[in-house]
Structures are given as C-alpha cells and as structure tokens.
Image: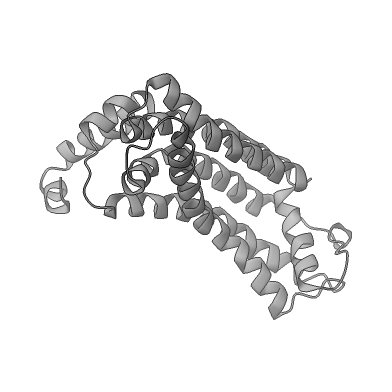
C-alpha cells in the first residue's frame, strides 16, 4: 500500500501495518510467506535507517547535556578534537544498525554453507533486515534510558578523570558518565534478549533462502545472534 493509499485510507493502512509487525514478531514464518517478496530493497534500507536513527536520538540528547555540564569543569578541556570524538558516539547507533544487518544477513548466509549452497546473498540480506525489528525495540528502550539520564544527570568536577590528555581518552572519560549509568547499563543489557529475538526471526528469514529445515535454520541463526548478544554484554561490562 503506497503513501497515497495510506492518506486516503488511514484506518486500512494502520490495520495492515499493525498486522504486518504483529505477524513478524510472533509468527515470522507466516510474515515471510505473506508479506515479503523478492524485489527491491527500499523498504529494508528504510527500516535499518530507522533502527539506527532511533538509537542515535538518545546519544544526541545525552551528548548535548554532557557538553553543557563538562564545559563548566575547568579541569577537563573539551576542545574540537574531543568534541569530534564525542560526536562520533551519536553516529555509532546509525552505523551500527547497518553493521548488525550485515552481521545477521551475511552471517546466517555463511553459516548455512554447512548445510547447503542454495540461495543468494541478496535475498538473505533482504529478509534479514526484517529480523532487526527487535533491535529497533531495544534501541527505543536504550534511547528512553538515555533521555531519562539526560534530564537527571549531575556531574561533579571529580567525576571525570581522563587517563591522559589525549582526545580519545578525554572523550571516553566523558562518555563513560552516561554509558556507566545504571539505568543505561540495564537498557544496554536488555538488548541481549532482543538480539536473541532477532535470531529467532532470522531463522525464518534464512530458512527458505537456503532451503533449510526449521531445526537447521535455528542452528544457523543462533551463531550471529549469540555473537551479537556477547558483544552487547562486552559493551556493558567495559562501560563499568
């Protein structure tokens, strides 16, 4: 249903959209059979972009407040190099969304070589993009946690202790104020569950591409899902 139809029939459009995502989250096999064809990547690219933007919003809100409070601490010099390093943190979720897409799509396609050589990378990537909807939910939770921290943070002069004056170390010390906050850490670790949920959906994404059984598809999808879950845990631990 195109944009013009959505404007003319908003009720029908909303109903179909809700049905689509409900099917994806609870009945991925039915979702791929009913909704996903083989042509074009525009919808998939848009979806991955939204996943990244949602994550970037929280980082942006926190960055603005961090800089505002850190600027008042004379012992910490926030020069242009440090600002550049911090601004990269805003882009990380956006870049990360596309990397996670590649990780699941190419990862499942590669692991499936243990069972078969059938299927194309293009179709694996197209279908894997939809498995990132749980990651979108995880990013939304994380952004909510970051937004909460941005309005409650209070940084004292002694809180920021860079290991050196190098821009990277100063930026890390500043950003760790947010990354190490308990509510943010909890939201980060919650991402493990959504990474595994993405793997569950991904199993059905790769199943028909590679002509796998359901059990084989679960084993294939478990590899990138476990890898991403471990990365999330590692990120949370190093933020402490």
Q: Is residue 203 left or right of residue 92?
A: left
Q: Quadrant of the N terminus?
A: top left
Q: Residue 117: percent from the left, percent from the top?
A: 37, 37
Residue 186: give x, y in percent of width and height. 67, 37
Instruction: Report the side of 26 relative to 67 (left or right).
Output: left
Viewer-nearest residue: 139 or 129? 129
Residue at x 46%, y 38% (from the top left corner): 108
The C terminus lies in which quarter of the figure?
top right
Q: Is residue 136 left or right of residue 70?
A: left
Residue that appears at 17% across and 43% down = 10
- Residue 153 visible to the viewer: no
* Camera-nearest residue between 95 and 107: 107
Residue positioned most to the bottom: 80
Q: Is residue 86 left or right of residue 174?
A: left
> Based on the displayed image, in which of its 4 quarters is residue 75 positioned?
bottom right
Q: Nearer the viewer, residue 133 or 145?
A: 133
Place of residue 56 in the rendered image (x, y in percent of width and height, measured from the top left): 53, 56
Colour convention of the picture? one colour
Residue 66: tell me if it is visible: yes
In the rendering, at what x and y percent does residue 109 appear?
43, 40
In this rendered view, identify the residue nearer to me: 18 or 35: 35
Is the residue 170 above or below the residue 54 in the image?
Answer: below
The image quadrant of residue 112 is top left
Q: Which residue sits at x=75%, y=68%?
A: 168
């Amino acid at each position: 249903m195109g944009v013009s139809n959505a404007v003319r029939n908003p009720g029908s459009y909303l109903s179909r959209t809700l049905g689509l995502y409900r099917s994806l989250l609870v009945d991925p096999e039915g979702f791929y059979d009913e909704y996903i064809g083989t042509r074009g990547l525009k919808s998939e690219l848009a979806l991955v972009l939204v996943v990244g933007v949602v994550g970037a919003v929280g980082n942006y809100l926190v960055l603005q407040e961090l800089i505002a409070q850190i600027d008042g601490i004379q012992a910490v010099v926030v020069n242009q190099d440090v600002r550049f390093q911090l601004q990269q943190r805003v882009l990380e979720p956006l870049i990360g969304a596309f990397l996670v897409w590649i990780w699941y799509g190419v990862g499942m396609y590669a692991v499936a070589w243990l069972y078969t050589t059938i299927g194309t990378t293009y179709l694996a990537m197209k279908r894997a993009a939809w498995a990132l909807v749980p990651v979108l939910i995880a990013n939304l939770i994380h952004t909510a946690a970051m937004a909460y921290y941005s309005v409650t943070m209070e940084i004292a002069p002694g809180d920021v202790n860079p290991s050196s004056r190098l821009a990277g170390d100063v930026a890390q010390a500043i950003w760790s104020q947010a990354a190490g906050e308990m509510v943010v850490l909890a939201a980060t670790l919650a991402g493990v569950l959504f990474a595994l949920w993405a793997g569950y959906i991904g199993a059905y994404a790769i199943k028909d591409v590679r002509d796998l059984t359901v059990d084989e598809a679960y084993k294939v999808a478990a590899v990138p899902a476990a890898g991403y879950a471990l990365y999330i845990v590692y990120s949370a631990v190093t933020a402490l």
